[in-house]
Amino acid sequence: MSTPRQPPKAGLLPSFIFASRWLQLPLYVGLILAQAVYVFHFWVELVHLIEAAFGNQDALKLIFQASGQKAEVAPTHLTETTIMLVVLGLIDVVMISNLLIMVIIGGYETFVSRLNLEGHPDQPEWLDHVNASVLKVKLATAIIGISSIHLLKTFINAENYSDKVLISQTVIHVAFLFSAMAIAMTDKLLHQATHKSDH
């Protein structure tokens, strides 16, 4: 019985070059720390909102300033606009946090090492077919979502922004939309070309 042939071992230089992918590990650890900062920021803003709802004037001033509102007279109570702006800010933090998770998990799985999560009950569904191309499309979609939240916050608080700022943010958002569409279209064309070449 013939023994199966062992794959040839890579040379020293190729092995060294391939091992250099681990240099990205500190970058992903840094993103995890950034995620922790976002979690802390989320809870600080949430606590300020709850305190303001119970009449804490210091917390009310803090969230009023943080939401970008301007007024000659200091606010005495929460308004619907202030609550909406703070909640949108919290949603913004969550969406950026989701973006970080996609970059950390998807990037590590794609460019550094396998996570070996097969069969894990909490494995993200999108991780089954993640690659550099899929990751780009998902990141572009997430960036559009974040941009939409920022644009909505600006429009709600439009009286405190100049026309130049409103137009600039709208143009930037539209540019993000076209960029995401271009990335998705390019990915689709490449996928079709690869599928045809396989046949």
Image (cartoon, rainbow, N blue to C red):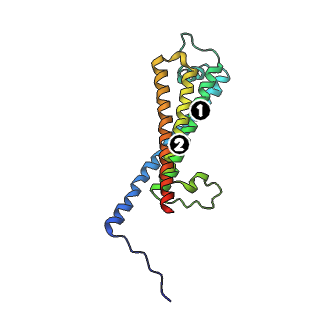
- What residue type is disc 2 on? Leu
Q: Residues within 10 Å of mark 2 (few under 14, many from 20)?
A: some
Mark nearest the camera among 2 and 1 is: 2
- Judged left or right of residue 23, residue 107 is right
Task: Check the image and report above or below for 85 versus 177.
Answer: above
Residue at the left extreme of this rendering: 13
Residue position for label 2? 99
Q: Residue 82 location, x and y as percent? A: 61, 21
- Who is closer to the viewer here, 173 or 20? 173
Question: How many numbered circles are shown?
Answer: 2
- Tell me which corner region of the image, top left, top right, bottom left or bottom right, holds residue 77: top right
- Tell me which corner region of the image, top left, top right, bottom left or bottom right, holds residue 56: top right
Residue 131 seen: no
Measure how far apart labels 2 and 1 are at the Cα level. Answer: 14 Å
- Who is closer to the viewer here, 56 or 25? 25
Residue position for label 1? 90
Q: Identify the residue at horizontal 58%, vertical 56% (top origin).
A: 128
